[in-house]
Amino acid sequence: INFQFELTSSADPELLFSTKIMNRLSEKGVSSLHKIEAGTSGLGWFCVQDVIDKKTKNGKVFYRIRAIDDEHNATWLRVWGKFDAGAPPDRFSRWMTHTSNDPDWGFSASVAKLRRIV
């Protein structure tokens, strides 16, 4: 997937968003992270395209995750805290989170609110 993404800036949608997973998310009423309106919060899923480890000026750890969906939408999600394993999520892994979408700062969530979709 990584090789295909680097070459063409896209990948086979069935590899990233299998029909089985997408049907299950639809059954449960979980929409893409990108569908959460500015100024609100909600439950959404996304696929990790890139992860950047960052620290605030006070040394607080957070991650900037480039989140993509099955409609080729991309946005940045700030994730506050440190992952239990110490390593950030793998590229092209799928996640679900409860997030807020601030009109000025964008999407933001806590590590504790992220769940991996297998």
Image: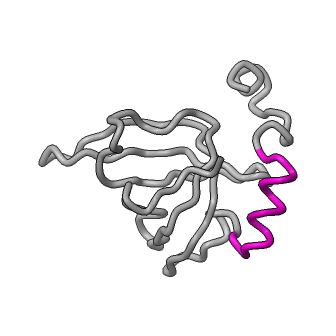
Q: Report the span colored magenta.
A: 17-30
Q: Is residue 115 left or right of residue 110?
A: right
Q: Position of residue 27 (x, y in %)?
A: 79, 72
Q: Residue at left 84%, top 53%?
A: 20
Q: Identify the residue at horizontal 86%, vertical 41% (top origin).
A: 14
Residue 30 in the image, given as x and y percentages of width and height: 69, 70
Quarter occupied by residue 43? bottom right
Q: Nearer the viewer, residue 78 or 17?
A: 17
- Residue 53 is drawn in which quadrant? top left
Q: Which residue is drawn at 38% across and 33% down?
A: 87
Above or below for 64 versus 110: above
Q: Measured from the top left, where is residue 38 in percent x and y?
A: 54, 76
Q: Above or below — where is 75 with respect to 8?
A: below
Q: Is 77 left or right of 73, judged from the image as shown?
A: left
Residue drawn at x 49%, y 39% as measured from the top left: 89
Q: Can you say which quadrant of the picture contains the N terminus?
A: top right
Q: Is 100 located above or below residue 3 in the figure?
A: below
